[in-house]
Image: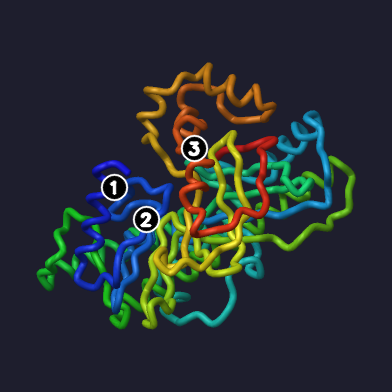
Amino acid sequence: MDDKTFKQAQNLANLPFTFKHIALMPDTHMGYGMPIGGVLATKGYVVPNAVGVDIGCGMAAVRLPLKEVDRDALKYIMNMIRKTVPMGFKKHYKGRPENKMPKGEQSDYLLDHGIVSKEMNNAKKSLGTLGGGNHFIEIQMGSDGHVWAMVHSGSRNLGLKVADYYNKIAVSENEKFHSCVPKSHELAYLPIESEHGRNYLEEMNYCVEFARLNRKEMMSCVVGAIYTILDLREDHDEIIDVAHNYARMENHYGENVMVHRKGATSAKAGETGIIPGSQGSMSYIVKGKGNTKSFKSCSHGAGRKMGRKEAQRKLDLSDEIENLDDKGIIHSIRTVKDLDEATGAYKDIEEVMDNQGDLVFPIVQLRPLAVLKG
């Protein structure tokens, strides 16, 4: 890791409520306050910046009863997906119906006074939308002989609004009580038993569920496009879904602690996970080993080795396009602006997988056939 990432890990380790140690995954790189690819366990406190702004961001993957798909069909499939899944800053013109939104018992605060209630109309229009950045939709060929579909996305603007609101409250509260944690560390915190702490956790959990349903809605469109173009009946395995930006209570080393995973995936013994590569590289379906030192976690992907602007400056456009074309991948690299999501901007997924052999078992390797980027 670079020096800035290591310094952020030191800041986390020095929090007065940190439990045991900081676990960094092999895809780790600098984030806001906490490294992406990091795991923080705390006693009695929650840190909004240790969850991140895209609350509930994660992966969905599904194995299809399909053994092959030709390039021409893939082009039609990707075109149909573009028409049904808004990407980038785009969203649906009309809101999704109420029955597609998160359900369950929710407090009056969340429904009537929280950020979720204020953002509900926009959230309904955002359900089933990809977003931008490193979010993607990919069609893949598995080492098991099946075609797979994969979606990477999160809670869209809803999670961002919740994260920003409670981080500002945490900063204000920490200043009021003269916290020993420097403001420059960007690690403002809330007691989990305080009113603000309870409200954050409830709204965070809503965003985690919203993100899962967002991926589910998009996966329905992706599978629908595949089956429509190929004239198949809609039948497939259960969708695998894992989040990698959240905090939850777990038991580690015999104690109940708040585990923050920011760009890290739960990997309990036997638990199924998804570790995507970069655009143009392999992805993996894995089983967790339940390694206690990692707080039973693994990486959430390959991890960046270049910042977005750095990639646009340093990477060669023709080389990146040629690399993807030689592999026969239908991709989305067109201009220098797209280089922030090129293969060369990310760490080598094979090295990342080798470095977490004590965390997960790879069970299916997924080779990219076609990819759409937000």
Instruction: Give the percent coordinates (x, y) of residue 183.
Output: 16, 58
Earlier along the polypeptide chain: callout 2 or callout 1?
1
- In this rendering, is residue 224 above or below 171? above
Under mark 2, the amino acid is: Leu
Task: Say few, some or many: other residues with alpha carbon within 10 Å of mark 2 (under 14 / 14 to 19 / 20 or more).
Answer: many
Q: Which residue is mark 1?
A: 5
Q: CA distance from mark 1 to mark 3?
A: 18 Å
As drawn, which residue projects farthest toward the top?
318
| Residue 142 can be seen, yes or no | yes
Q: Is residue 320 left or right of residue 25?
A: right
Under mark 1, the amino acid is: Thr
Quadrant of residue 47 within the rendered picture: bottom left
- Split into 4 quadrants, where in the image is the N terminus? top left
- The answer to whether mark 2 and mark 3 are in CB contact below 8 A is no
**What residue is at 61 percent from the left and 53 percent from the top?**
362
Q: CA distance from mark 2 to mark 3?
A: 17 Å
